[in-house]
Amino acid sequence: MLTIFLAALFGFVLLSVPIAFALILTTLVMMFFMHAISPALLIQNIFRGIDSFPLMAIPFFLLAGEIMNVGGISKRIVLFAKALLGHVTGGLGYVTVMASMLFAGVSGSAVADTSAIGSLLFPIMRDEGYDTKKSAALFSSAGCIGPIIPPSIPMILYGVIANVSIVKLFLGGIVPGILIGLGLMFIWYLHARKKHYRAEGKFSFRVAAKATVSAFWALLLPIIILGGIIFGIYTPTEAAVIAVVYATIVSFFVYKELKISDLPKLLINAGKSTAVVMLVCGTATTAAYLITTAQIPALLASTLLNLAGNSTIILMLVVNVLLLLVGCVMDLTPALLIMAPMLLPIVTKFGLNPIYFGVVMVVNLCIGLITPPVGNILYVGCSISKLSIAELVKAIIPNILIMIAVLFLITYVPATITFIPNLLSH
């Protein structure tokens, strides 16, 4: 059954069948071989997969990201980052990473992060004479930080699957997200030094103060979201609604860049993105039900246990390699929804913390967003930069390697993930 499942799923994916429909077809194939075809069961599990209160956070975070892009919030975050780091040699590269990290604190979506920061900064970097391939590689890689630094849509999904605290998952993503940002800055530093980019003027307290005042309401948003969640004032779902209300008020009445006429398009875009995520959630739940019924997790567990013996070091090495390969051929959301139910029983049997494992899994699959052939962010990066996939992939390899290095660092130093959740839970 494991062979049938993998052959059917990857067969449909290679035939360019959209992932949600590939999951439905794979489920039907498995039902056929298990002599248990039941349309009613299929539909029931699809609805069961989306009938979850925490999942309501997803459409609101997506809508908040759309509003911030149009309403001037993202632009002011970029100008704030530029005022602080623009004077450094190759400064726009550091601005790109810092802006992505700040935007990650309010969006939770890699595509929204990459689209917002890339469309704002890439034209400036190109006009300033920066290497277009490396610039595109940088904003694409920095977009992966979006689902790692809280709030995070994939961590909401994992929290629902694993029935663990979404708040602790959010807190666990802070240090890994910062480490990836610093790693990307280091790679850019080596590139900027090699290319001898010129510094853009000198640091000015006046300009920095002006940018800070202008961006004040934008910078307050991640504090409102994370502060309220951390101190138990509201749940992540309620925080998502607050993010939409706050972003709308600031964009309408403070920055005055959001117009009533923009709202239909924003709602439609957020609705489309939500529909895709929810459909995948539903179909992945159906596939997960059949996977469990066919005892595939037990088969996978037995294989991994044979490979790992009693060593958690080898187990996590094998799991990370497996997830990196899965991330190359499958988008983050379906990969998470399919692999988490299969791997969770195995890692818990080894006594590993499910919060720790969830963060490792999300970071791992985020790397898949910029690995060919399926990496979603690659296509966003190509669309903005007008480069071919081959050109962007070649330029992005050093960034992927530094992200993998961070992945193994957080894997084998669990305190990088658990320190903040443990600190704030006491």
Image (tube, helix red, strand yellow):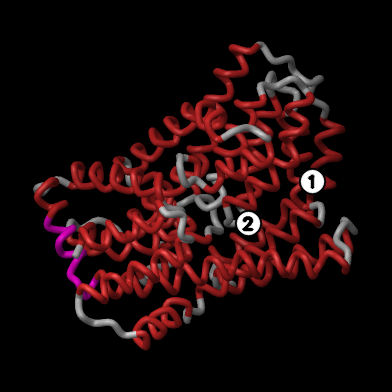
In this figure, which residue is indicated by the disc labeled 2? Answer: 107
Residue 76, labelled with which disc? 1
Majority secondary structure of magenta residues = helix
Give the x, y percent position of residue 373: 45, 42
Magenta-drawn stretch contains 125: no
Name the outermost residue toward the front: 15
79 or 274: which is nearer to us?
Answer: 274
Question: Does 278 sit above or below residue 386?
Answer: below
Mark closest to the chain's N terminus, 1 or 2: 1
Residue at the location (46% across, 40% down)? 372
Q: Does residue 285 appear to the left or right of 97 in the view shown?
A: left
Disc 1 to disc 2, C-alpha distance: 15 Å
The answer to which image quadrant residue 108 occupies is bottom right
Question: Does 199 sit above or below residue 305?
Answer: above
Q: Does residue 100 appear to the left or right of 246 in the view shown?
A: left
Q: Which residues are magenta?
A: 292-302
Q: Does residue 8 appear to the left or right of 85 in the view shown?
A: left
